[in-house]
Image: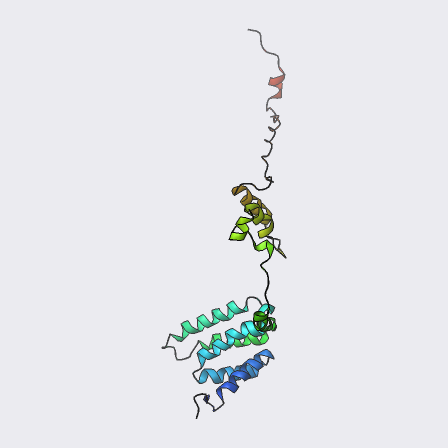
């Protein structure tokens, strides 16, 4: 028997079970995915199962559900914490593993992250890009030699594509520019003082007395 001939509790080849788990999750086959996850768990491969699930979160779901990596990691942390309580014979840590497998099965799938990894890493040795001009700024020597300072930083270096509509975005940008030396006229010109309020006429409770002429002394 080679050192790679690993078997699960029911006698399955370990690597075949691992592959079956991932392929079933990719296909959304909940029943089968849970079967293989339980088989690995019962065979004392809990840490390996979690390693595969964390990889799947990026590899097979990725940008389709941007927060799923953090959610799977949180479930893993709950699992680890619960597993330390050896006095609990019900193994409640299984709850978090089940949660993770079902979440991955039901999630929208995308392979774009893994495909991007293969594309960029496989071709990297054969491509040579030039540093773009907009990257030469006050943070590097070539940019400083070009005299690029705060103005370049605000109007070129911090240019955003697909900028979201975040409350206060433009106002804080202007405040930041003002704070470092006002590279552009401030949009926060001093406001004109408010006009004094019009006098309020108070109605008297004794209009007859107000209308009476002053008595002669």
Q: Is 148 located above or below residue 69 in the figure?
A: above
Residue at 54% from the left image edge and 75% from the top image edge: 56
- Residue 77's place in the image compared with 165, above or below, is below
Q: Is residue 95 above or below residue 43?
A: above
Q: Name the residue at 49% across, 83% down.
A: 38
Of residues 157 and 216, which is closer to you in this image? Answer: 157
Q: Is 22 left, or right, of 43 in this rendering? A: right
* Quarter that holds the C terminus: top right
Residue 98 spot, x, y in % from top left? 50, 77
Identity of the residue furthest to the bottom in this view: 1
Colouring: rainbow
Q: Is residue 99 visible?
A: no
Direction from residue 177 to residue 41 in the image, left or right: left
Which x, y percent locates residue 61? 58, 72
Q: Which quarter shows the N terminus? A: bottom left
Q: Quadrant of residue 30?
A: bottom right
Q: Position of residue 200 (x, y in %)?
A: 61, 27
Residue placed most toward the observer, 159 or 41: 159
Q: Position of residue 127 (x, y in %)?
A: 60, 68
* Residue at the image position 54 percent from the left and 69 percent from the top: 68
- Residue sitting nearer the eye, 104 or 19: 19
View extreme (left): residue? 87
**Snapshot quadrant of residue 119:** bottom right
Residue 17 visible, this orientation: yes
Label total for image: 0
């Amino acid at each position: 028997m080679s050192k790679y001939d690993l078997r699960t509790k029911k006698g399955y080849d370990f690597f075949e079970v691992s592959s079956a788990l991932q392929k079933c999750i990719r296909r959304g086959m909940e029943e089968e995915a849970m079967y293989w996850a339980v088989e690995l768990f019962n065979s004392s491969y809990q840490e390996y199962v979690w390693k595969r699930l964390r990889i799947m979160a990026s590899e097979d779901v990725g940008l389709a559900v941007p927060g799923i990596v953090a959610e799977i990691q949180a479930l893993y942390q709950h699992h680890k914490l619960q597993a330390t309580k050896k006095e609990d014979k019900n193994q409640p840590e299984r709850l978090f593993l089940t949660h993770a497998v079902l979440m991955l099965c039901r999630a929208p799938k995308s392979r774009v992250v893994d495909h991007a990894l293969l594309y960029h890493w496989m071709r990297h040795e054969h491509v040579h890009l030039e540093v773009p001009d907009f990257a030469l700024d006050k943070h590097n020597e070539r940019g400083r030699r070009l005299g690029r300072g705060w103005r370049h930083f605000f109007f070129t270096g911090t240019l955003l594509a697909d900028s979201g509509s975040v409350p206060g975005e433009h106002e804080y940008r202007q405040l930041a520019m003002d704070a470092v030396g006002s590279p552009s006229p401030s949009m926060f010109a001093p406001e004109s003082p408010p006009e004094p309020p019009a006098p309020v006429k108070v109605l008297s409770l004794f209009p007859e007395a107000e209308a009476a002429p002053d008595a002669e002394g």
